[in-house]
Image (spheres, helix red, strand yellow):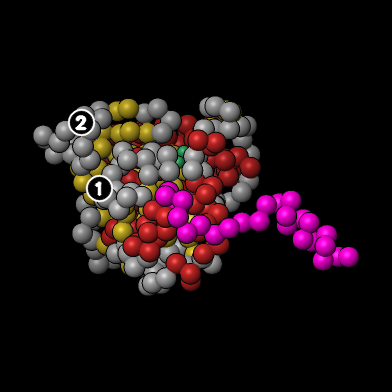
């Protein structure tokens, strides 16, 4: 059975979906066998599966879209001055993959950069495909044609309040102590139904598009993490901004994705946290343990 909607005439998605599905099958095989883990830096992992998947995607995209450029996480820089540029994350969720935690995917996002686009300016996101090989979930979007999961149209959630929402975030694998996110994580956890930290930015965005999450935020991301998922969220009716509410940019490295209804409230809470206003007091671990000990006497 096809995992794409029958009535929609895509320009890029069909081929990209076939490529992502093939790369995902390859990841599934490596995952079943188990792979050695290598280190890019102290806690930034990479495996043979990441590299083999990127090579397969490079071969397939360059054969099927010979005029397009490709920018991949594992080092591919293929004709990146071309009008169309694919951002490739051959395995998003490598830490999960390496530990046997079943949450990872392939992410392919296509940007259109017409002649005259300044080198540091964004083009337009035109297509995105995210494939989760363990669940066989195929998320696709093409500009103006909507977002879909396994052929079914996607819409963001309709939840209007932070207090009743489920959110997600992530933490970078480098320079974690410089990242302010633990403060946001703490505050939003206390004000919502919860904050998931599942370890795949692309799936976090896809889940926001699908209404499985009401919002997602993260710092220090790269275009290969976000390109496909950003288009999914927008085509499903959600909002994509930075922390200051300005429109999301591929190179801005930060993402706040919401169902649209939560955007103002969430950005307001973030602004308060950054300004140190209205924070929820948290007992220290020492105070908590003393409280438990006192209750036992
Ligand atoms: C990582 C994942 C993770 C996010 C990290 C990313 P990788 O990508 O998306 O969820 O928190 O910031 O680097 O390294 O597994 O492709
Ligand atoms: Ca990634
Ligand atoms: Ca990756």
- Quadrant of the rendered image containing residue 268: bottom left
Please tell me whether residue 114 belongs to the stretch shown in magenta.
no
In the image, residue 286 lies at what x, y percent?
Answer: 74, 51
Q: Is residue 22 visible?
A: no
Query: With 35 as the anchor, is 184 left or right in this view?
Result: left
**Picture residue at 18% right of the left edge, 39% below the top:** 113
Question: In the structure shown, which secondary structural element does the residue marked by tag 1 occupy?
Answer: strand
Name the residue furthest right: 297
- Quadrant of the rendered image containing residue 89: top left
| Residue in front for this viewpoint, 76 or 189 | 189
The residue tagged 1 is 125
Whole-angstrom CA distance, mark 2 to mark 1, is 16 Å
Q: Identify the mark at residue 112; answer none if there is no mark.
A: none
Range shown magenta: 273-297
Which image quarter is the C terminus in? bottom right
Please tell me whether residue 289 belongs to the stretch shown in magenta.
yes
| Residue in front for this viewpoint, 291 or 55 | 291
Which image quarter is the N terminus in? bottom left
**Picture residue at 53% right of the left edge, 37% below the top:** 176
* 130 over 83 or under it: above or below: below
**Picture residue at 52% right of the left edge, 49% below the top:** 183
The residue tagged 2 is 119
Specify few, some or many for label 1: CA neighbours under 10 Å numbering under 14, 14-19, or 20 or more.
many
* 203 over 108 or under it: above or below: below
Taken as a whole, is the magenta stretch helix, strand or loop? helix
Q: Is residue 190 visible?
A: yes
* Mark whose residue sits in front, 2 or 1: 2
**Picture residue at 67% right of the left edge, 52% below the top:** 284
* 249 over 273 or under it: above or below: above
Question: In the structure shown, which secondary structural element does the residue marked by tag 2 occupy?
Answer: loop
């Amino acid at each position: 059975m096809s995992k794409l909607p029958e009535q929609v005439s895509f320009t890029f998605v069909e081929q990209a979906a076939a490529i992502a599905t093939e790369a995902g099958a390859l990841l599934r095989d490596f995952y079943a066998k188990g792979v050695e883990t290598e280190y890019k830096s102290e806690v930034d992992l990479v495996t043979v599966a990441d590299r083999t998947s990127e090579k397969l995607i490079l071969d397939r995209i360059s054969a099927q879209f010979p005029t397009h450029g490709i920018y991949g996480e594992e080092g591919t820089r293929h004709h990146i001055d071309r009008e169309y540029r694919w951002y490739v994350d051959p395995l998003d969720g490598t830490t999960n993959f390496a530990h046997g935690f079943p949450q990872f995917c392939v992410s392919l996002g296509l940007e259109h950069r017409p002649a005259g686009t300044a080198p540091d300016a964004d083009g337009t996101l035109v297509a995105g495909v995210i494939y989760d090989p363990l669940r066989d979930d195929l998320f696709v979007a093409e500009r103006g044609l909507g977002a879909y999961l396994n052929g079914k149209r996607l819409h963001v959630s309709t939840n209007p309040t932070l207090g009743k929402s489920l959110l997600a975030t992530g933490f970078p694998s480098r320079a974690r102590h410089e990242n302010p996110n633990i403060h946001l994580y703490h505050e939003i956890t206390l004000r919502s139904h919860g904050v998931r930290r599942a370890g795949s930015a692309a799936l976090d965005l896809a889940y926001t598009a699908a209404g499985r999450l009401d919002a997602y935020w993260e710092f220090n991301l790269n275009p290969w993490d976000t390109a496909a998922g950003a288009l999914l969220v927008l085509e499903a009716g959600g909002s994509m901004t930075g922390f200051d509410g300005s429109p999301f940019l591929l190179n801005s490295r930060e993402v706040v994705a919401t169902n649209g209804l939560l955007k103002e409230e969430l950005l307001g809470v973030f602004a308060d946290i950054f300004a140190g206003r209205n924070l929820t007091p948290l007992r220290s671990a020492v105070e908590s343990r003393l409280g438990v000990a006192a209750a036992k006497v």
